[in-house]
Image (cartoon, coloured by chain):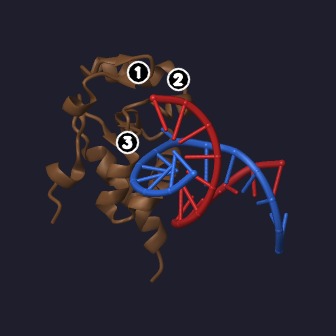
Chain colours: A brown, B blue, C red
Amino acid sequence: MEDSKSNFFKDVHEVARLIPAGRVTSYGAIAAYLGVKRSARMVGWAMNQAHGDESIPAHRVVNRIGVLSGKHNFLGGPEVMQQRLEAEGVRVQKDQVQDFDQVFWDPMVELGVD
DNA sequence: GTTCTGACTGGGT
DNA sequence: AACCCAGCCAGAA
């Protein structure tokens, strides 16, 4: 009755932290897991609020085609996102995650759809 | 207060 | 295959 909205952002941050190193997920996947599949944009906005919080691996969140859509939003520069991904073993080329299907981490599956 | 944009996505043209 | 449009919601001008 009060923080139903803030709860959404909090859930996004929580799921983001659950992303294992060397894996990536999409905004839509997180949104769908939270039951707000249409609000994928809000997931991105939630990450924007997460700026400065190193507990939230925002660099592991990309769009549905594996493109580092939010790299420009990172502190320090857009290359930081790719650098971090490569440091975890994720191959990135031209702002796109290589073998996206392999490194894709779906909360619906990994955490359980139930 | 209205309008536009945006770290998205799916569907239509 | 490329481009356009509608839906979602929050913040900035």
- Where A94 falls versus A35 (above or below)? above
**What is the secondary structure assignment of the residue under circle 1?**
helix
Q: Position of residue A34 (x, y in %)?
A: 33, 62
Mark 3 / mark 2, whichever is N-terminal:
3
Q: CA distance from mark 3 to mark 1?
A: 16 Å
Q: Where's the C terminus of chain A, which quadrant? A: bottom left
Q: Position of residue A66 (x, y in %)?
A: 37, 32
Q: Amino acid at mark 3?
A: Ile
Of marks 3 and 2, the one in the foreground: 2
Q: In which quadrant of the rendered image does the N terminus of chain A lie?
A: bottom left
- N-terminal of the pair, mark 3 or mark 1, is 3
Q: Which residue is mark 3?
A: A56
Q: Are marks 3 and 1 on the same chain?
A: yes
How many numbered marks have been drawn onto this rendered protein structure?
3
Q: Which of label 3 and label 1 is nearer to you?
A: 1
Residue A93 falls in which quadrant of the image? top left
Q: Which residue is mark 2?
A: A78
Look at the numbered discs 2 and 1 and tell me whether their residues touch, using CB distance below 8 Å.
yes
Q: Are marks 2 and 1 on the same chain?
A: yes
Q: Is residue B9 left or right of residue A114?
A: right
Amino acid type of the residue tagged 1 in the rendering: Gln
Tell me the chain of label 3: A
Q: Residue at x 50, y 52 (%)?
A: A41
Q: Please rate how many residues cluster around mark 1, counting C-alpha atoms within 10 Å: few if below 14, some from 14 to 19, many from 20.
A: many
- What residue sits 43% from the left and 25% below the top? A81
Residue highlighted by disc 1: A82
The local secondary structure at tag 2 comes to loop
Q: CA distance from mark 3 to mark 2?
A: 17 Å
Q: Residue furthest bottom?
A: A1
Circle 2 packing at 10 Å, graded few (<14), some (14-19), many (20+), is: some
- Residue type, numbered disc 2: Pro
- Asked if residue A13 can be seen in this view, the reply is no
